[in-house]
Image (tube, rainbow, N blue to C red):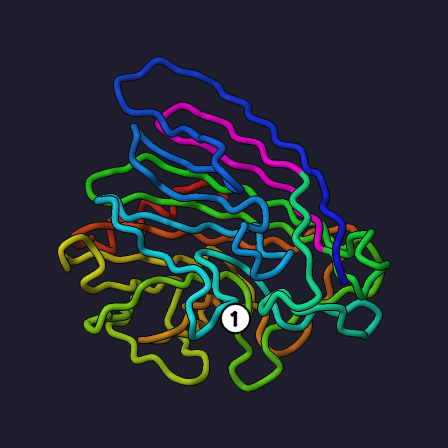
Amino acid sequence: MKLKKTFTSFILILFLFSSGFSQISMKRIDDGILITEGGKKIALYNKEASAMNLDKGRANFFHPVYLPDGTEITQNAPQDHIHHRGIFWAWHQIMVDGKKVGDQWEMKDFIHDVKSVEFFRLPNNMATMKTIVEWKSPNYQNGQEAFIEEKATVNFYGEHRNYRIIQFKIQLRAQTDHVALGGSDDVKGYGGFSARIKLPDDVLFNSENGLIEPQNEAVEAGEFVNISGSLAKKSGQGGMLIYSANDFETANDWILRSKNSMQNAVWPGRVLVPISKVTPTVLKYAIVLYSGSIKENRVLKELNRLEW
């Protein structure tokens, strides 16, 4: 089915403050919005399906995402999993009235209709992007009406020492009755906030109890996973720490892979959960991008001080 292109609004709001540091800024390029600090690239938000035209709904994700030294750390549409796309959140099981209407993970019968993007430059070398995205499918009201409204707030913090924090708050609210989400319908149950990043041969996964060995199914690791290895320029050390600020049942469950795949903070798992029309479902995560190495305890203290 050929889907009608939806026109979306784009709003830029800047609150300017005089300061001695480089400011975080945005620039509209091609099909996305590039976030920078003092000319250094941070991340590109893909607002619209790109000219590569893999599918009409391939939007609402961040790629490329950069380490502080300028290394592009994410991947988009790799040959082994062409539906993987940088930093994204998605689910296999999307149900309305007990019937599957689409697959957001594999982008089958699914449309991300980005209705608005706002960008706020704030004090203390911080900026916020707020998006409103309607979830649609040709299998629900012929793709003309949304069954979920997503509101995301993404905070970009200025580079500190050798790392940068990006904070995500994702709110999902049903637009009709009897909407439910679930991860993959198998023992892995993967789905939710995910990162497709480049994985060197020496990649390591670490959490509060030390090194983690990836398994086929989810592993319980704690509130964070630190993914490190030869990820920076000239095969230097670098990495990404993914932090879950949630308290739901699967908040400490992670699907981890050492090659050819994504890293996933599991929610809700295989079992479907209802999405309310009244009270939004709220998901809270952060990523820490670093070149060299980091002291996890120091970074965690900073993450715990963030407002959620």
Which SS class for mark 1? Answer: loop
> From the viewer's perspective, is 101 left or right of 264?
right
Q: Position of residue 307 (x, y in %)?
A: 47, 40
Write the residue at 42% across / 61% down.
195
Q: Quadrant of residue 211?
A: bottom left
Write the residue at 30% across / 50% down.
289
> From the viewer's perspective, is 211 left or right of 122?
left
Write the residue at 20% across / 40% down.
161
> From the viewer's perspective, is 272 left or right of 288?
right
Q: Position of residue 2 (x, y in %)?
A: 75, 58
Q: Is residue 201 above or below residue 41?
A: below
Q: Residues within 10 Å of mark 1 (few under 14, many from 20)?
A: some
Q: Residue furthest top?
A: 18
Q: Is residue 140 above or below residue 221?
A: above
Q: Is residue 278 above or below residue 219?
A: above
Q: Quadrant of residue 137?
A: bottom right
Across the whole image, how many numbered discs are drawn on residues? Answer: 1
Residue 122 forms part of the magenta stretch: yes
Residue 50 forms part of the magenta stretch: no
| Quadrant, the N terminus | bottom right
Q: Nearer the viewer, residue 235 or 308?
A: 235
**On the image, numbered disc 1 is attached to which residue?**
250
Q: Nearer the viewer, residue 172 or 6?
A: 6
Write the residue at 46% across / 55% down.
245
Q: Position of residue 162 (x, y in %)?
A: 20, 44
Q: Quadrant of residue 257?
A: bottom left
Q: Is residue 30 above or below residue 77?
A: above
Residues rendered magenta in the picture: 116-135
| Tag 1: amino acid | Thr
Magenta-highlighted stretch: main secondary structure? strand
